[in-house]
Amino acid sequence: ADVPLDDWSWDTATRIKADGLKQSLATSKNIVSLIVLLHGLDPLKGVSIKLQKHDADIVTAYRHIDLAIEEVCHMREDFDTVWSEWFGEAESLATDIGAVMTIPRVCKYQQHRSNVPADSPSEYYKRCLGIPFLDSLLSQMNERFSIENRVVQSLMSLCPSIICNSCTKDLEDLAKQLLFWGVDLPSADGLKQELVRWKLFWNEGRREDKPE
């Protein structure tokens, strides 16, 4: 809604800047960008909250991160449906503030902004904002949390409080990850059985206080 500037005791320069900011925020690009950020980063909200807990560990952290990456992947795979909902919300927001969804003029050569061909605002912003944002997000997350960057996770999984809650599949995966240090192990062939014994040792009834 329009805010009557006459009700504010602002000088002329401040009024001009405020009005310019208001007009800028009401552009189609900024409206769509807001919705894309709101929903595109939503999978990371839960991760950021859970990782702030005092008892969070690196193994649990990577599990939450993997779930977030998987959720973003699902969004990207079904992006036509996802985008339909996102752009519909952007149009609704534009209507509420009296803005009209438009696309910039497309020219033959363009160096300073996206110049993708599109028949509608929805298609234009999908190609120049929605798809590039999710692709970049997935690329950054996969790079930062790649297998090569999380080899230490396998060592943390040896903590009694973690390994006691591991299933057979978890132990098999852990044994494969620990082979990264295979040359330093006395016998890598019996690694899985060693992990089973380590779990049984800490699962005995008298060991209630398991190191974390």
Image (cartoon, rainbow, N blue to C red):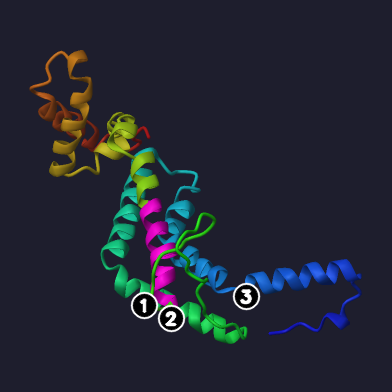
Q: Can you name the residue that lies furthest to the left here?
A: 189
Is 134 in the magenta?
A: yes
How far apart are the two marked residues, 1 and 3, measured between alpha carbons?
20 Å
Looking at the image, tell me whether mark 1 or mark 3 is earlier in sequence order. 3
Query: Disc 2 vs disc 3: which is toward the camera?
Result: 3
Circle 1: element type: helix
Q: Give the range drawn in magenta.
A: 121-137
Residue at numbered disc 3: 26
Secondary structure under tag 2 reads: helix
Local secondary structure at mark 3: loop
Toward the front, the furthest residue is 108
> Label 2 sits on what residue type?
Gly
Residue drawn at point x = 49 percent, y = 77 percent: 90
Contact, mark 1 vs mark 3 (Cβ under 8 Å): no
- Would you place residue 5 above or below residue 166 in this image? below
Is 167 magenta? The answer is: no
Q: How packed is label 1: few (under 14 Cα within 10 Å), some, or many (20 or more)?
A: some
Give 140 or 180, whichever is nearer the viewer: 140
Task: Identify the residue position indicated by label 1 in the image.
Answer: 84
Residue annotated with mark 2: 88
Q: Residue at x 15, y 29 (%)?
A: 197
Work out whether residue 174 or residue 145 is closer to the camera in this orientation and state it. 145
In which quadrant of the rendered view does residue 24 lie?
bottom right
Spatial CA distance of label 2 from label 3 is: 16 Å
Q: Is residue 174 left or right of residue 14?
A: left
Percent of width and height locating residue 130? 41, 64
Q: Quadrant of residue 129?
A: bottom left
**Residue neighbourhood size for the residue with mark 3, other residues' Cα within 10 Å, grouped as few (<14), some (14–19), many (≥20):** some
Residue kind at label 1, given as amino acid type: Ser
Residue 62 in percent (x, y) is at 34, 44
Whether residues under marks 2 and 1 lie with C-beta atoms below 8 angstroms apart, the answer is yes
Q: Quadrant of the N terminus?
A: bottom right
